């Protein structure tokens, strides 16, 4: 059973973490005069603070999941959102497991997670690990196995980025889409816009990521 997965993340909403990060923003060490320092703050200070907070969207310690998209095999693409990150994670566990039960033949649920393959773009180092980390931070758990780094790739995992570029290298999903002649119908210009987008556009963006991921996987494995 193939499971296609994509998550969308936002910067931390915690005030204490935002304050801690912005307190660490300072002019470069070679700025010595009060005039030069004041000029740097006027021209760069706010942008640097925003960037420091924005980078938490890629860090499972502080960043938060705002949407989870998935599809099982050739089935419908689903997206889970919620008012809070905890809502998103709780709803996803329930909705996803319900989809698994609906997909599998009666009587074949035993050890289903040992027979599935999780598929995503950078899914090994980002999506699955970030998901696992946020579940722990929120004090939640899943009753099925998520294939993290301790498992070898395949048969539990197929990372389209690693399969295409090789370990330690990188290729954008959108570049693979372009190379394969796949058309993206996305309300967002890129994933970087998720932090400021409304929830409907985030869902549409996540859904497109999963749809095109599935097309890329088919192209790479057939």
Image (cartoon, rainbow, N blue to C red):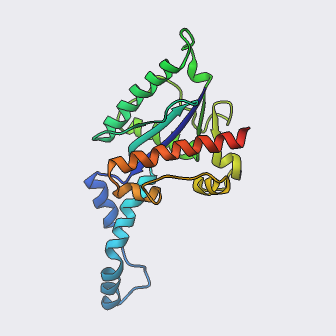
Which quadrant holds the C terminus? top right
Residue 101, how many percent across, how many down?
48, 18
Estimate the x, y position of residue 184 in percent, counting from the top left: 53, 52
- Whether residue 176 sits left or right of residue 97 in the image: it is right
Q: On the picture, is 181 further left or further right than 212?
A: right
Nearest the eye: 67 or 64:
67
Residue found farthest to the left: 15
How many dots with numbers?
Answer: 0
* Residue 194 visible in the picture: yes
Q: Is residue 177 above or below residue 81?
A: below
Instruction: Give how far across and how far down residue 22 sits, in percent.
Output: 32, 65
Residue 97 place in picture, x, y as percent: 45, 23
Residue 80 quadrant:
top left
Q: In this orientation, which residue lies closer to the viewer: 7 or 62?
A: 7
Residue 15 found in image quarter: bottom left
Which residue, as the protein is rendered here, is positioned at the far right? Answer: 222
Q: Quadrant of the N terminus?
A: top right
At horizontal 50% and vertical 42% (from top left) the residue drawn is 6
Q: Residue at image x 34%, y 58%? A: 196
Q: Which residue: 62% across, 22% down?
A: 115
Residue 25 visible (yes or no): no
User: Against 189, is 118 above or below?
Assistant: above
* 57 horizontally vs 219: left or right: left
Pick the front one: 108 or 84? 108
Q: Please state if 78 lies on the left or on the right of 20 as rendered.
A: right
Residue ID at (43%, 80%): 29
Q: Is residue 32 above or below residue 93?
A: below
């Amino acid at each position: 059973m193939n499971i296609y997965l994509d998550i969308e993340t936002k910067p931390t909403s915690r005030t204490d973490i935002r304050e801690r990060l912005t307190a660490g923003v300072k002019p470069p060490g070679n700025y010595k005069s009060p005039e030069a320092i004041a000029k740097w703050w006027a021209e760069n200070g706010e942008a640097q603070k925003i960037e420091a907070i924005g980078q938490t969207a890629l860090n499972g310690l502080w960043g938060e999941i705002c949407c989870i998209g998935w599809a099982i095999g050739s089935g419908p693409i689903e997206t889970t959102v919620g008012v809070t990150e905890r809502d998103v994670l709780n709803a996803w566990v329930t909705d996803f497991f319900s989809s698994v039960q609906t997909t599998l033949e009666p009587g074949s649920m035993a050890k289903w997670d040992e027979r599935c393959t999780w598929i995503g773009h950078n899914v090994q180092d980002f999506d699955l690990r970030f998901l696992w980390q946020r579940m722990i931070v929120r004090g939640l758990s899943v009753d099925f196995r998520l294939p993290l780094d301790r498992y070898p790739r395949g048969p539990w995992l197929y990372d389209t980025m690693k399969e295409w570029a090789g370990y330690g290298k990188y290729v954008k999903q959108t570049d693979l889409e372009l190379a394969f002649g796949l058309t993206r119908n996305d309300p967002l210009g890129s994933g970087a816009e998720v932090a400021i987008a409304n929830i409907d556009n985030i869902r549409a963006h996540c859904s497109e990521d999963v749809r095109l991921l599935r097309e890329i996987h088919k192209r790479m494995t057939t």
